[in-house]
Amino acid sequence: CSCFHKKKKNPFGQFCLWDFPEGGFWPKQSVATGVAAGTQSILSFVRPSSMQAGNLIGLPWDDLFNVLENPEQLGPGWIRDNEATLTQQLQILCGTLQVDASFLEISQVALSVDEATFAVGQLVAYEPEAVSRLSLADDIVTSLACSLRRGWQIHHGVGKFAANALTVLVTCENAEKKIRTKASQLLLETLGGWLKDHKKSNDKVEEVCGCHCRRASTAACCFLDRVFARPDKLLKEEVQKFPGLIDMIKDLQMVVRDEYGCPFSLTSMLQIPGVMDAVMKSDAHVCFNPDPKPVRLAEACMACLSYAMLTVDDHFFTDQSVRCFLEFAEYGNGQGFERLMSHPISLFMLEGLFPAACCLPSAATLIKKIAKHPRTIRCILSLLLAVCTPSCPPTSRTGKRWMMKKDDSSAQKQSEHRRQTTLHLKVMALVDKLHPKMPRTKSCLSDSKILKTKIKKRCPVSQEKKSDSLYWKTLTKNATGKSCYDNKATASSADIGHLVSPDTKGDRKVSQVSFGSGHPNRGEEQMSPQLSRLQADIEKLKAEIKQMKNMNSDFTEKKDSNDQEAKDDPNSWRYFRKRALSKLKGETCTSLARTTYPAIPPWPNVHVERDPAIAWLIIEMLVGEERAREVVQWRLSLVEVCKWLQRRLFCIHQGGQDPHEEEPLVLIECDRKGNALSELRQSNENKVGIFGDVSGQIEVHFKNESANGPAVLREWFVHASEYLSRPENNLLVSRDGGASMMPSPSSHLSNKDHKRDFYILGRLVSIAIFKRVPIALRFNKAFCKLILGGASLYKWTHDDVKELDSQLYKFKVKYILENPVEDLDLCFTDVLDDRTGSDFTVEGSEKQIELIENGQNIPVNEQNKEDYVRRVCEWRLHGCMKEQTEAFLDGFYTLIPKETVQGLSVVLKPEDFANLIAGLPNVDADDWKKNSRCSGGYTTKDKQVKWFWEIVHEFDSDQRADLLHFVTGSRNPPVGGFARLQGFNGDQKFTVSKISSSIESLPSAHACICTIDLPEYTSKDMLRERILKAISLGGIGFNGHGEEDDH
């Protein structure tokens, strides 16, 4: 600089004072003050009249930064006691933050601004109320706003730290109103500028203030979400008055759509009173490349939320999006609803709404409003047919269908396909009844068969050629190269819908279709004249399809060579966004309603998934619960029922919950060596533990063990359920050698308060189902029928008696019916609790119970023996455990309502319900291996991995269960097999990991992530020995990392 005339040094370290000549240009005087014993430097820019340089040198900077680095020392008292000194320090720090932007090119200045932002931001973030009452509060807000605008020039962390401080100040309702108002205005203005900055930071991104975004635009979404999470009156007023509101929302929805910004920022802002009205009235338009036609802002926002609902797996976001749709639809006395349903977003909104309605009351409310509109019923029926369409049966490589063989998995797949087809036919019949004037709706496969017949008439194929199914598979390839029979991608309903259109005679004809290159075994030079003409027609039709600009033809995304985040994954956010927003001339609810199709038009989304749970919901909405149960009865797989149940329970216990509220946390303390039943009784009295609000997280701690996590939770459920089933508790008894359990008929003899214990058991089982945790209790068929039937007597057969107690059936039921009874000296009584062959007996359990009034005086003879047998069977199947079952259901219904259980009773068999509670009865080694992976350096080709799976296959059922318990915390696989193992964040694959430990060490398990660590053992026998020893010791407990303790 040419204006300085002298330079002074200071013994404090890196300190220099620049004096400008008096009478010259005094924009600012610069003072660099050394702090932290000379290891840090802050370059401060203050006015000359504000403070003497000597006073700056003696300020206790070390004390300030020590407190800021340990913010637990901060508090209103500390600020009040050090207000004078703090004011002087804040003057210097604020002056630093307001430095001219041109100085930021100097590394020392940039570092000083960084340090000053930390100091001021830390102070404001931890004590916003106290800071807002300082005399310099206005200057502090202005300084942080400067740092907010310029921070990304220095480092992304500088801007984020300033944004976080202002966000905390703005959302602090106890701060001074004047200061909050100014902070709100500056924060909105600056974040609006961030939304326009799409440059990606080249620095390594580290999380700062909970934000790990690499762009200022996406970081703005994060902080806007925090600001508008729970806006108070002041914030709402400031948003309504904000002059750049429309521009901000326009930029915000584009960042959410194109750059994966936090979608909650958009939903939170649209729900602020007055914002949706402003958006609906706005004439602002948004352009989506490559379509040059602009779209109105309101429709663009709804489109963004529609496709986000299909790709963001978050119930809370879906709930917020649905609330935005409700406001949109209610705008202007139906005007908003018409705009919504006449836009292409309506179809994808419906597609996202029905899965959401299974979990969220708000989505169900919106669907009820939509369903009242006459134009939407056809769309809903179209979606109904799409979500219950059976999967196309895959063909073998030779083109042949599945061959029915014994003990072949293909037989199970064929059976599954038949079940899906039965449900689809039932739904089609229902659609016919709802719309009798329309001919029977054809599915994707049905339309394909019609085309197949027409093509074969024009060009017959020799039977000597390859199979007809393979020929059709080749011919019916669509524009993306996917076959209608491709197991990876089912044929599009929309594509098939375009293939077939009505003509004046009512017959169907081929209008638009793209086929493959002819018969697979026939070359171009060997084509017959008929096939050549057909091929020419096909080429013309392929050209027509390429010219179609609808949602299906523009569904494929092109990779952006300049952006590594671009993906072609059909399940990705961008894939859906491109499909919908690159071209908005596709079909709408209104266009589908007005179509001239002779049947329900096909759903236009090629990737809609089969989901009978959604079909169930739609049918309930159309014809009521009872009729819906008749349609879906016995036509859902156990996995599909679990999916329906989990959605229903989420809707009951978590639907509509504020996403910004903390989930309730339940703490359970347990002693492995203690009395688990006594602990549960105490928790029931105090209404804590599992008797509190279990809709959130459950955290379990075993005594003298510090671990927690999903594996510890699974372990506790196994521990508690095993303790409840002990014979000395006399709650449960087995009639089949311990394979299954049922309530003890004599439980009241040993425990006067047995109803309370059965209530506890019912509560425990319902929570296990809700949390998808298998427990160590497998109920028998009779008890499961009573649970599903609400403790009422069901229609039974002799097979039920035989399954309950084979000895009872053989020596009493069957014998009496087939032999004379006069010499048996029987009367109409039965024993209370028959435990023949059991080592545990209860005094009084052999008491005789009268089956009818004065039954002990009514002898059994040939005329009434059938009545006697019937009453004995009803007593054993129902009467002896009715009281216990009712108490069990009182606890069970606290989490799973009676109406939900009634729904389960029509889709679940008793044995499936037992599996739902206890998991699958057998550990399938092949399924285990199929749903596993390797990590840490192991691959499937390594000998240690091969040995491991060979050992698993050689283990007997008990050893496999012990190994599974060691690595997951549960002895049984969950419903759905090993593909549904649960980790911290949902489904978790079993993992075999390599570690560098000595071969003398034992395998260790990370049960919370279903992982076993194996050293590089040198032989299979050594590996077997180590695994067996680890299993025998691993059940002792968990170590501090949530792993099985192998010491």
Image: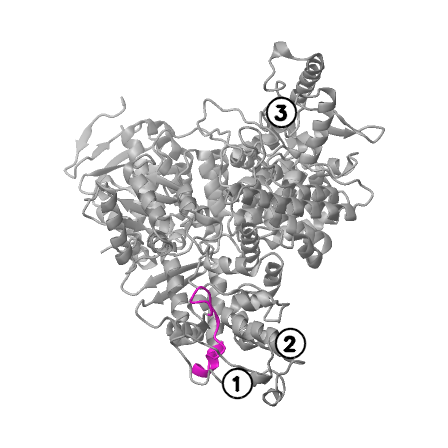
- Residue 418: give x, y in percent of width and height: 62, 44
Residue 743 versus residue 152 in the image, above or below: below
Q: Give me the disc on residue 471.
A: 3
Do labels 2 and 3 touch, CB within 8 Å?
Answer: no
- Determine the residue located farthest toward the right in the rendered image: 505
- Residue 40: give x, y in percent of width and height: 22, 38
Residue closer to the observer: 158 or 907: 907
Tag 1: residue type? Gln
Residue named by callout 2: 866
Residue 671 versus residue 476 in the image, above or below: below
Q: Residues within 10 Å of mark 3 (few under 14, many from 20)?
A: some
Residue 848 versus residue 303 in the image, above or below: below
Residue closer to the observer: 376 or 938: 938
Tell which circle, 2 or 3, labels the residue nearer the N-terminal end: 3
Tag 2: residue type? Glu
Secondary element at tag 1: strand
* Magenta region, main secondary structure: loop
Residue named by callout 1: 848
Q: Which residues are magenta?
A: 735-755
Residue 438 in the magenta stretch? The answer is: no
Q: Residues within 10 Å of mark 2 (few under 14, many from 20)?
A: some
Give the CA distance from mark 2 to mark 3: 63 Å
* The N terminus: image quadrant: top left
Indicate left or right for 432 with 44 as reference.
right
Tell which circle, 1 or 2, labels the residue nearer the N-terminal end: 1
Q: Residue at x 66, y 80 (%)?
A: 864
Residue 796 versus residue 304 in the image, above or below: below
Would residue 833 be visible to someone looking at this image? yes
Tag 3: residue type? Tyr
Give the CA distance from mark 1 to mark 2: 20 Å
